[in-house]
Image (tube, helix red, strand yellow):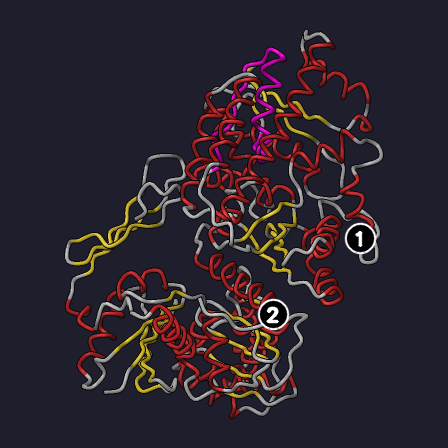
Amino acid sequence: MDNYYLGVDVGSVSTNIVLINENNEVVYKEYLRTQGKPIDILKDGIGRLAKEAGYNNIHGAGCTGSGRQLASIVIGTDIVKNEITAHAIASLNAKPDVRTIIEIGGQDSKIIILRDGITVDFAMNTVCAAGTGSFLDRQAIRLGIAIEEFGDSALKSKNNLRIAGRCAVFAESDMIHKQQLGHNQDDIIRGLCQALVRNFLSNVGKGKDIRGPIMFQGGVAANRGIKEAFQEELGEEVLVPENFDVMGAIGAAILGKERSRDIGYSNFKGLDIYKRDYAVNGFECEGCSNLCEVLEIKEDNKTLARYGDKCGKWTY
Amino acid sequence: MKISFPHFGNAYIAGKVLLEECGHTVITPPVCSRSTLELGTSKSPESMCMPFKIFIGNYIESIQRGADTILLTGSCGPCRYGFYSYMQKDIIKKLGYDVDFIVLESFKEGIPQFSKNIKRLIGSVSPNKLLRSSRLALKLIKSSDDLTCLSNEVRAYAIDKDKVNFIMDSFYKDADDIHGFNQLQNLINDTERQLRTLKINRNFKPLRVGLIGDIYTIIEPFINLEVERKLGYLGVIVEKSLTPTKWLEHHILSYPFGSKFENEKYSLARPYIKDMIGGHGRETVGSAIYYRNKGFDGAIQILPLNCMPEIVAKSVLKRVVKDIDFPVMTLVVDEMTGEAGFNTRLEAYVDLLYKRRRGEMIIG
């Protein structure tokens, strides 16, 4: 039987689960919406994976994403890694000579600069989520179209309509104004895509030495309008890898595989975890004026972990 | 006179003792916490910079503990700190608190006001005693800064890093209840001894990172989401480019020439920024180059949201980083207490530094 490795990326908008084989090829992938319930979604995903026959030979696991601590407690992973490294590893696996990675997710957008397979520079959006997936989601709702149709709609447009992209709030009022003037919806969507790309390049990508081959990944890479806008702005081809939406999880799986091989065993708890009961209980510690929000995770009434406190009183 | 002052890193430890020696009752504000921030934010102008809001929170919490006089330093530099005393006096008054403000402006702003303020603070203490107390206070500031510095170093090497935090937390707790130079100095020495006896991994080769940016955000652990501790856990030795000690050495002890260290930063920054641009913008640029020359692995700029001098420094740093080939990451701090994004950036940055050092991808 083949050996498989599990990778999990718990992000703000999506939770992704992949299974790779010894050759780092994706044999199974799932893209789920987190909907603010990471544990439930994770359990659902693992449950579905468990029911697909033949994948029970899992010898390592890794996790990443903003919910990585939680995921690692629930499923028992060999490595917990930040998204930057995970994405870089997955991209290098897909295209070893990649030199720039653009990743736009739900709340984060990042640029990673690589040279000869080594990360030499990276940047993430600072305090503002203007150029990210959530922004597009919101505008799609406002325009009354499904986010899946967003990109194709932008490609239909041939006009240049400028929409202010510096801030999501500015963009929204600018967009409403253009709508009221009677502009075509496709043009507005194209304008939005360009605004987002401009925002990304002037905020996150500022001062970075962007050279080809350029990879574009993360949930937003599904949007062909954005890809097109990037190509226009950068004057270079932008590649979207086959598994663009789960690249973080692939990176985590590769890292988990290498770590479990190094240590010779795996901490992975097995696919049966979807049958167990997890409860998260949050409370405010009143020990001092920091009022830390402490979280407690229970597995079948047994406390797995507590975290969130500054002083270490509850952590274990 | 029950006197209080806003937090400024470790400076409150020495400040408390010095003012007590001058015969005042001192009420130190509680350690900055979420409630400080919430109080400060609700009473401050929305787009004001972060330190302003924390100061307001400190005042209110001190007043609730019984303070009736607030001491703070003025400034005439081109940064919003210059407005602090005027606006804060106004805000506190409008909130209905009846407190006195003693604003220590530089004597260049008028000798009569300066000496009046000093007289109020010194009271009837003899010049001899004052001189001796000031010396001891300086020593205390220095040794408390050295202690934090030592804790950062030990944390990077320590096998059980939680113990370092535990020792430092109890130090800060005890320092609140202790009075007098000798007792405090003993406490510091004691804490130092405890830190030095912790088990460390001698074979470990930690990364070294300089913390640069605005002084307040560097030295107040609550504001920068305890970046020193977080980096320590990742096995990084952190050095702060600015501390109360360094500030005093530059602005008071070596007046008017300035300390050697700060002057070196100025000359390093000169090709990029010739003049004072307010706050610590020029120092930030100089420090980045300084740490590169010292063989550090990287530097992290802590930028309080919409701090003008640091924004200028950030833009300039982009060029500097290219010229000197040195990785500098900027972290923006504001009212956010969610730490996930902050941790991700720090971890990724540390990964990057390790890779730079080894010239290869590393796992784990």
Q: Secondary structure at mark 2?
A: strand
Label 2, label 1: how many angstroms apart (C-alpha)? 24 Å
B246 relative to A168, above or below: above
Question: Which residue is depicted at the point 77% across and 29% down?
Answer: B253
The chain carrying label 2 is A
Question: Which residue is depicted at the point 71% across and 46% down?
Answer: B280
A290 relative to B234, above or below: above
Which dot marks residue A293?
none
Q: Is residue B114 left or right of residue A40?
A: right
Which dot marks residue B268?
1
Question: Which residue is depicted at the point 48% across and 41% down?
Answer: B37
Q: Is residue B225 visible?
A: no
Magenta region, residue range = B6-32
Type of amino acid under label 1: Leu
Q: Nearer the viewer, residue B93 or B62?
A: B62
Type of amino acid under label 2: Asp
B360 relative to B150, above or below: below
Can you give x and y, in whole percent of width and height, for residue B319 in the image?
A: 74, 65
Q: Among all residues in the image, which is located at the extreme front?
A: B203
Q: Is residue B250 left or right of residue B87?
A: right
The chain carrying label 1 is B
Which dot marks residue A121?
2
